[in-house]
Structure formats: C-alpha cells, structure tokens
Amino acid sequence: MAVYLDHAATTPMLPAAIDAYTDALHAVGNPSSIHSAGQNAKRVLEEARERVADSLGCDPIEVVFTSGGTESVNLAVKGLWWARQADRPRPRILVPGGEHHATVDTVEWLERYEGAVIEWIPLDALGRVSLEFLRRALAEHDDVALVTLLWANNEVGTLQPVDQVVALAAEYGVPVHSDAVAAYGQVPIDFRASGLDALSVSAHKIGGPIGIGALVLSRTATVVPLIHGGGQQRQVRSGTQDAPAAVAFAVAARAPHQPYDALRDRVIAGVRAAVPSAVLQGDPVDRLPGNAHFTFPGCEGDSLLFLLDAAGVSVSTGSACQAGIPEASHVLLAMGLSDDEARGALRITVGHTTTEADVDALLAALPDAVARATRAGYADRAPLLGR
C-alpha cells in the first residue's frame, strides 16, 4: 500500500465529510429560490457558513464561499487593490518573497495589466518576512494599496508574524490580506482577533472536498468583485452557491484536528539520522506542525521524488517544474539559498491518516533514494533540441 506524505498538497476527505456530502447531494434546491426546496437548501447552506465561521473566529456574514484558495486570493488581492484606487491612485502592493503562486501570479497580473507597483519584501534565512523592511516601505510610500502575506509558508512551514504585520499596516491605514490555506487546520486562526481585512482558506486542506474554499472578508472591508451576475454573497461573489460542498466543508471545519507535532518531529529526527547531510529548512520551532522540509546537497529534488514514488512513498518537492525543465524553488531562493541548494528540496507533510509505520517506510526508502539521486546529479536545465 502506498504511503502518502503530501498532505500539504491535499489531504484525504474525512469519512464524515464524505457522508455529509453524499447525503446533501440527494437534496434538490437552489439556495436563491423562494420555494420550500430552495429555502431548505439555503438553510443548510447558512448553517454550514456558521460552522465554518466558528472555526475561523469570524461572523458568518464575513464568510464568502469560493471555488477554493486560489479564487479567494484573487478576489482578496485584486478586489482590495481595485477598491483602493477609488479616491486616488494607490498602485503599490507590498508582498513578501516566496509567496504561493496564487499570490505571485495575481500581483504580477495586476502589474502587467493594471499598472500595479509590486514591492517585494525580503525573507530571512528561515523564511520569515522582514518587519524592518516592511516598516520602511510603509513609512516611505503613501501609495500602498495593501499588504498581502502567507499566514505560514506553504513550502518550508515557517509561521509569519501576521499580528505584527497587521499592527504596522494599521498605523498607515493599509489593509492586510493573509493566505492561510496552509495554516488552516494546523494552527489556531482567530480572524476577529487578528485585525486582518481578508483571509483565504480552502476546504481540501482540512479534510473537506476539493472545489470549495472561503474568503473571510471583514464587515468593514471593501472589494471590487471578480465575478458578476447575481451578487448572491454580499454583492462580493456571484453564482449559485454549492450547498452540498459547503455542508462537507463545515463537517471538516468542525472536526477535531489531531496534533501532528510528534509525527513531524519523528520525520525530522529520522531524516537527520538516515541522511546526515540533509538540511532542515524553515524555522525549526515556529513552523507548521505537519511540515518537514529538507534540502539534500548534490541531489535533484525531482529525482528524489520519483525514486521515493517508485518505492511507494508520496512526497513533494515544493518547487516549480515548467515544460519539463527542473527549476529551483522560488521560496528557497528568496531565503538566500543558491540555485543548486534550492533544487535539492523535499517537502514531507503528515496529516490525519499518517501513522508511525508511514514514517518508518519513508525513512527506510530515503537513504537509497538519496544515494541514487546523488549519483545522478543535477538535471540539465536546457532542453535538448534535435540530435
């Protein structure tokens, strides 16, 4: 049986969420319809919204269901940016290096097509945003539309100082959005206490279904919508709402999430013992409880991934690979690693189905995979044309 250690990419649906999903699919009704079938669909949808809100420390009205984390990030970043141009130009967006591509690609789109000015905030060697650089950027520019940052880095697992970022931005009246997709279900999230204007999450990272997420949008925040055609959710997001997916999302949101620290620490200690040259990346303490991220000198991460996959163990490199050309992780590069160092990365993430036997299987397969990947060396980054 295959060992699955890529829970940061997606985690298996909880059996209770599957049951709730399939039960809800038997009911018919558009939540916007005024007849009894529609109103029943609306009732279960709003009950689900209340449960999701409870898991995030916000009011139900602040939960805007979306198709997932990527749409939530797009709606928050583009929507806040557009809204902030209403009274005067504020083109600047402050973004830490090493963000998820949902954010990177969104701000670069705004730069290319809307005239946004992107200011990249440096990371330290542990992957944490530089508060001093952020402070200077806020003080020096009066044209900042928003700050956006991860709650926790999705690759190396480092927790970000979201509360300090919010406090700094508040001094200048600048709204803050946080992508909490990787953190949701791993660490406590209290939107109300955070002072954030917007926060993005996704159901499939906590045992819910793929295809639904949420943007938590403060009552006082204003965004310009991405999608038009009905205004079903606060005139912020249009479209018929997926009540069955919301029900399953709510079940996952209310499920007690087991602590993963012990299994993660077992992975970290085991990898260090099995491969002494391996280097743990990210903050060794203030990191996601399910995340263990290593670089292996002299290895190509993709080679390690395929060798472990052949041995029945699923992990992730966390790096981009476009058109079959291996590329170094932009997160690790932002942390100051060299191109070669950043290419030898593996992200190992545990979740609710992980057992000690799974960890043992990884540790048994890893030394041979590293030895073989080391002999293979780095892949040629230039595609061969012709013969």
Image: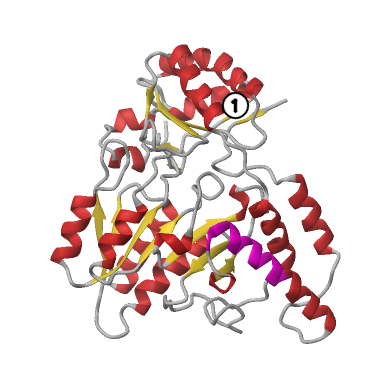
Which residue is at the far left? 140
Instruction: Inspect the image, locate mark 1, and give the three-letter code of the amino acid beneath it.
Output: Asp
| 165 lies above or below 44 | above
Q: Position of residue 194 (x, y in %)?
A: 41, 60
Q: Is residue 69 visible?
A: no
Q: Quadrant of residue 59?
A: bottom right
Q: Residue beneath label 1, please? A: 309
Horizontal placement of 330 versus 47: left or right? Answer: left
Q: Position of residue 237 (x, y in %)?
A: 55, 76
| 173 lies above or below 330 | below
Quadrant that contains the N terminus: top right
Numbered-mark total: 1
Is residue 56 magenta-colored?
A: yes
The colour scheme applied to this rendered structure is secondary structure
| 26 lies above or below 220 | above
| 387 lies above or below 18 | above
Horizontal placement of 140 versus 211: left or right? Answer: left
- The 10 Å Cα crowd at callout 1, few under 14, some 14 to 19, many 20 or more, is some
Element at label 1: helix
User: Residue at (84%, 82%) from the top-left corner?
Assistant: 36
User: Residue at (77%, 87%) from the top-left corner?
Assistant: 34
Quadrant that contains the C terminus: top left
- The answer to which of 194 and 32 lies nearer the viewer is 194
User: Residue at (37%, 35%) from the top-left corner?
Assistant: 282
- The answer to which of 386 and 52 lies nearer the viewer is 52
Query: Does the magenta stretch mainly form a helix, a strand or a loop?
Result: helix
Q: Position of residue 82 (x, y in %)?
A: 36, 77
Q: Is residue 283 visible?
A: yes
Q: Position of residue 104 (x, y in %)?
A: 37, 56
Horizontal placement of 378 versus 249: left or right? Answer: left
